[in-house]
Each structure stands twice: as structure tokens, then as C-alpha cells.
Image (tube, helix red, strand yellow):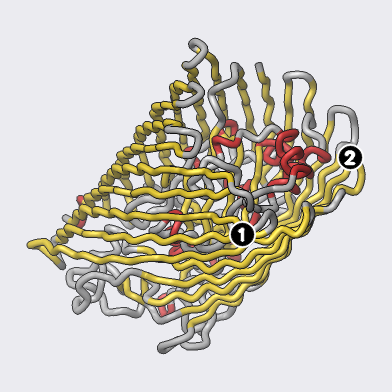
Amino acid sequence: MGTKPTKIALLLGSLSTLALSAPQALADELEASKIDEHLVVIGRADTLPLNIAANVNVIDSADIEMSGATSLTEVLRGQSGIQVSDNNVGTSYAMRGFSASTAVNNTLILLDGRRLNNIDIAAPSLNAIPLNLIERIEILSGSAGVLYGDQAVGGVINIVTRSPENTAGSVQLSGGSFNTYEGRGDISGAINDNWHYYLSANYNQGDNYRDHNANETGSILGRIQYKTATDMFMVESSYYDDDRENPGSLTEDEFKQDPRFSWNSSEYVHQMTTALRSAYQHQLNQHWSLQADVDYSDTLVTSLNWGTNSRNTRSLLMFSPKAVGHYTTRQGELNLVTGLDISRGKAEFHSSARSNEQRLQSVYLQATVPLSQTLNYVVGGRYAEVSDELVDGAAYPNGIDLDEDASALEFGLNYRPNAEQRFYIRYDQNFRFAKVDEQAYTPSDVYGLKPQTGESYEAGWDWIGQSQTLKLSLYQLDLKDEIVFDPSANTPTGGTFLGANVNADASRRYGASVDWDWQLANAWLVGLEYHYVDAEFTAGLNDGNKLSWVAEHSGRGYLSLDFAEHFQLFTEAVYTGERFIEGDNANEGQKLGGYVLANAAVNYQRDAWQASLRVDNLLDKDYVSSGYFGGDWGDSYYSGRGRDVRLTLGYRF
């Protein structure tokens, strides 16, 4: 393909190591790689993510092209220890030892720094983001409670979109298994020296692997940007529409007999979201810049499940002003970032006569302070308050007001003895508040859930050689009052199904990760990563039991080979280890078996033309992509996607 593995290895090696003040050799490498620094928002500062005492991985557009992946889910699967759960109508992404249902609320997902996590427990719809829109993906593994506050517990995934500053465009058409067809297009250009525009559109339809699981999905985005030496202003509007049939769950016997089977014939989920965003940045002087984002989203979800029609609406307005400072000292760069995060979300669940207006405001400050040219420390804090105005037709017909607060502190050390190595240690507190629908479905004697709080400890070492890179990290994550759904809890007043949302017993997660890649020759690149998580309860009835749905062992290996002038081969294997089915906190049942998904792609590029043939689940492995413990009622299973072949043709202009 057009980007040789040698350049890919350079990008991976350069960005996998973090520091406040990179030596000149590393700075030259970054400049040669032509990274758009102003687009990197991990750290909420206007710099590369090199000053964060944390494990950060960057997947750029060259990596995405190298993989031949056709969806964001396949790009993220197995990366940085991410475990994917798919119930055939939505996907969640777990980091550092969370189950599928809790991952939605403990993995923060951003688009250019804007939150995509919903104010209710529904998973964010990453299908709304076509791959041609993505410049790169930044993955921060671990807690980021000071930088991002609510829900930044297990990790942060930030998706950075393309800049409109270049005149360019592309068109892609693809088709493949399960009657899947997709079209993508984007164009950007200059109106004049200061004004630029960007437009992107995507349409996808297919029957998918399961019976009665067809989808029709489309999105469109438009952005106008004004930029001078001291000011930047942009306004953006987007619309997303996903209409998807719901095949429902299977019993264990049904899954073994035919994983594609579905009893459903009319159930569906239809989601429509409109989003508006505006951002302004002003360089006040040589040291300080002022920035502010205003974001608004409005979503309508209609569905038919278990023979019942439902209609839910949610809206969210966010205002995030901040100030960023840079000072040069004899020891190195002193960086400061401080700001406010203010949001107002409202959800109405029409079928249950329930509504909730949630207001959240927080203030934060983080400083990166140099002690020498090779050593710096990061310190910061955040304070947050939340209020809920909840009405529920059964539990709170006259309404109830709930108020909570939480705080977080952070301290980290970065030590870089030379250009090849970096050591870091980090302590970060985290929290999350109950979602708007979690507060309503609690036991009758519980009036509001307490905030979930936690502490994260981490240490790591990064090494960059001439042809190899190696990253090692160790961590511990302790949580108390974790907000979960407990199927054995007392059903709320007027509840329609067993169980309730509760503050669970304390839990602890130990973990380790190894990430290695090696440029064998100009045409060869290989990589391996392994992730270990020991997640268990540390108090209460389930003390000592393993947390459900968390695979103790997971990993990924890949190989890229440029085998001809215009051709490149990519293969990968993603391993997910055995685990208890979700909800089996007593560890009563048998573990689900581990599995390996093998994927392969052949890519071709010549001049402005591109082609890719990608095969996901090459060996057609049957596996459970999502499952829930049912006790005496029996467990529920959702099938992973079978062998999937996609051919994509593209043209850039």
C-alpha cells in the first residue's frame, strides 16, 4: 500500500512514548511524520500527548488503511486490551476489567474531545463515524478522572477527525457478505485564505449475520472553519440515522444448533441523532490561549421489543471553556490547563412515564511541572456536582430531587533518561455519577445511588529502538460503590423485570500489558500485545469471586508485508480468554470458552486509486459476542459475526 511499514513503525514508535520535553532527535522524528499537533486533544491541551504520565496508544489513518478494516469496531477490537461486546443491535468497548453493561459507563468515548457517551445507559453509536472521517484514534488506558471527570474510569478513546485545511476528497464503495453495501465520500477545500469547509457522508445497508438483523444506516457531517495565526473558529453539524432489526437472544441449545437463528419477526431499534458543535480558540499572548466548546445533541429512539412499543428522547447541552498555558523554564516546559465542564441533559422515557433532567458542573486544574530536562511531574484536581430532577410514574410520581458531588486528584512522574526510554508512575482518582435511567430503577428503599468512586495506580516503561518498540505497564484499579444492575436485587416499585440498579460491593482489578512491534526489514512489520486482568470482588457476599464477563487473558498479533510494488498483505489474530457469563457474580455457571478471531486483508494502491479485500473471522469461528446470566431461567446468548468478506474500491482527488 502507499504507506510503507517503515513509516508506520516510525509513527507507532514516536507516539507510544510520552514526555514533557522530548529530546531533539525525537522532536525531529515527530516533525518528519507531519503530525497535526493542534488536533491532539488527549490531555485537553494544545500539544502532543507526550506530557501525560499514562499509557497512550495512537492509531493513525495509515494504520487503519494497513488493516483494511471496514468498521471502527474492527479497528478497536483487541487494541490496548479493549474487549468488544455486541448484542447485535449495539456495541460496547470495555477497558481494564469491566463487563459489557458497565463498560458503557466506565469507558469514555470522545469525538474531537466531545463526549459521545449518552446520558442514559445506551451505548454510544460508533457506527455513526465512517472510517474515511478519521485522522487518528487516541487511546488512553486507565483512569482520567481529573482530565475528563465523569465516566473516565477504565480508559478514554478519542476519535480525531480530519482537518479541513487541505483541498482534497475521496469516494469509496464496498460490498460483501450478508448483502452488505456501503458508500462513503468526503470533500474539503478553501473558501479563501482563512475559511475552509469539510463535508462527509456515509450510507450502509446489510442483512448482517443473524436472521432478522438487517440495518440501514446513514450519516452526514458538515464543518466550516476559520483560522488565523491567533484565532480559530469552527461550526459543525451532523445527522445520524440507524434503523436496525433486533434478532433477540438465544438459549444455549439454540446457539449451538444455529447461531444465526432468531425467534423475532418484527422487533427493531431506530435511532436518529442530530448534533451541533461550535468551538473557538484565541491565542491571548505567547503564554496563554483561551478555548471554548459548545455542543448540543438531540436523539430520538423508537423501538419494538418483547411486543412493546417504546419512544425515548434525550438531549444534551455542554459548555466547556478552558485556558491553556505554556511557559519555558531552564528545566523545561511548564504546562497548565484549567477549565469548566457544564452540562444539562434531559431524557424522557414515554413508555414508562419517566423523565429526568440532570445537571452536572465541574472545575479542574492540571499542571505539568519540569524538575529537569529529563524529569517532570503532573499534578491536578477536579470537583464535580450533579443534580437530578426525576419523575417516574411508578416509583416517584410526584418527582424527587437528588444531589451528589465527587472529587478526584492526580499525581504522576515522567522520567526520560534518554531518547529511547521513558519511565512513569501515576496515581489518579476517578468517579462516575448514576445515569438518568439508573436513578429511577433502584430498590424501593434506595433514594438515589451514591457516586461510584475509585483509585488507580499505574507504572510503565517504554523503549524505542532503531527497529523495535516495547511498552510495559502494570496497574491496580480499586472501586467502591460501583453502579451496576443486580438481577438478584429487590425489584423497584412498579418494576417490570427482576433486579435493580445498586451500589455494588467493593472490587479490585490488577493488570499488566505488553506491547511490542518489530520492523524486520523494509517490507515486514510484526507486532504482539498481551493483556492480563485479575478482576474480583473484595467485599460482601461475592468476596473473592471473579467479576463476570472479564477475560483474564487477551491479546493480539499482527503481520504486515509489502509483497509487491503496489500490494500489501495484513493478517492478525485477536484472542479473548475464557470468562463467566455476564451477571454470574456468584460464579455458579461454567465459563464461556476462549476464542481466536483471525482476520486478513490484501490492499492495493496505485496513484489515486485504492482497493482492499478484507476477511473478518477468516476461520468462521462460532463465538458468543454478548451473553447474560439467567439463573433458573437460563442464560441468554448473542452470536458473534461469522466469516465476513468485504471488497472496497476507492479514489482520492
Quadrant holding the N terminus: top right
Residue type at mark 1 is Leu
Q: From the viewer's perspective, is 227 left or right of 376?
A: left
Q: Quick one: label 1, few (<14), some, or many (20+) residues within 10 Å?
A: some
User: In this picture, is 278 found above or below 165?
Assistant: below
Farthest residue to the front: give it.
330
Q: Position of residue 339 (x, y in %)?
A: 37, 48
Can residue 605 be seen at all in this image of the molecule?
Answer: yes
Residue at (82% x, 49% y) in the render: 559
> For this rendering, which residue is in front, 573 or 336?
336
Q: Earlier in the sequence, mark 1 or mark 2?
A: 1
Residues under labels 1 and 2: Cα distance? 42 Å
Identify the residue at image location x=51%, y=78%. 508
Instruction: Using the rendered view, name the quadrant where residue 409 is placed.
Output: bottom left
SS at mark 2?
Answer: loop
State the quadrant of the C terminus: top right
**Circle 1 — which element?**
loop
- Position of residue 281 in the picture relative to residue 313 (left or right): right
Q: Residue at x 71, y 39 (%)?
A: 30
Residue on which disc 1 sits: 371
Q: Nearer the viewer, residue 417 or 109?
A: 417
Task: Give the residue at mark 2.
Answer: 523
Give x and y (percent) for residue 451.
Answer: 33, 69
